[in-house]
Image: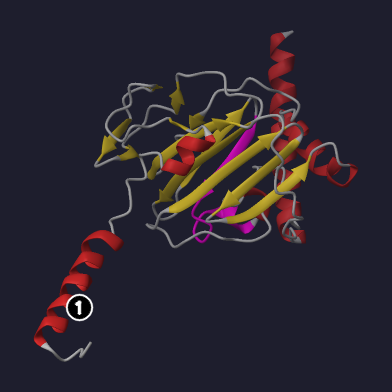
Amino acid sequence: MNLFQPSAILTCLCLFQFCTWGCAAEPGSPNQLTKQEQEQGFELLFNGKDLKNWDQSGNWEVQEGVIARTGKGGSLTLKQQPLPDDFELKFEWKVGEGSNSGVYYRPGQYEYQILDNQKHVDGKNPRTSAASLYFCMPPSQDATRPVGEWNQGRIVCKGTVIQHWLNGKKVIDFDYTDPRYAWHVELLANRGAQLTDRGGVLYLQDHGDPVWYRGIKLRTIPGDESLDRSPVKPATVSDEALAAEQRKLQRIMENRARQQQKQK
């Protein structure tokens, strides 16, 4: 075929228009399940329209398909409780400058830290930075996007294994029964949490700062499903950050002792 003939040119234009319409379709809403997610058994925890499945004090609202913290009042808590023991949770998040929040998914202090690492003081210590298991396990790297951009978070828990993912990178993967991480587990226990606890509520923390969430999806992990256990090395915590961490822990333990004394 002579590509310079009018009929050939018309054919090429039609094929181009077809691909423009059909081949480059708009991506789906983050508040919808993809076909793959449906096949994997995910359920949508936020419908993009309202917060009818969540408990709050009026300080959270939906703005154009996004959950936004708009004032004082406390955390946003999922009514559907408790979470399964073995699960995968996916969500998208972004923060304002200097903001702090968190996704809590098991009893006590199981927290996926949400943070502006560059401006907030917690960003100085990897163990309290974005995507950390707060005050326990630091991520392997800072994989956050600039403030104001959306990040993809993912939490995977099965048995004694905990994984945190950020923007497609697995940044935490550890078995809390592994002797190598005994000190990390003890650190969190001293703060007041036991990693053996189950049956927790899912909630988004109100820390007084602007934060946004969307695309919150959950599934139960079947017992016969294997996890990606490729090794992840926790980031190194500097001596300065360790010293500040110990001072903070000392204050926590002193406050706890005072509270226990008052209860006697």
Mark 1 lies on a secondary structure that is helix
Query: Would residue 172 appear left or right of 147 to someone viewing this image?
Result: right
Residue at 44% over, 34% down: 206
Mark 1 — residue?
12
Q: Amino acid at mark 1?
A: Cys
Determine which quarter of the picture holds residue 77.
top left
Asked if 79 appears above or below 31 in the picture, the reply is above
Range of the magenta residues? 109-124
* Residue 138 is at least partly visible in this image: no
Residue at 40% over, 42% down: 213
**Farthest residue in the right direction?**
179
Number of on-image labels: 1
The percent position of residue 207, horizontal first and vertical second, equals: 46, 38
The percent position of residue 94, horizontal first and vertical second, equals: 41, 50
The answer to if 114 sits in the magenta stretch is yes
* Residue 229 is at least partly visible in this image: yes
Residue at 60% over, 52% down: 129
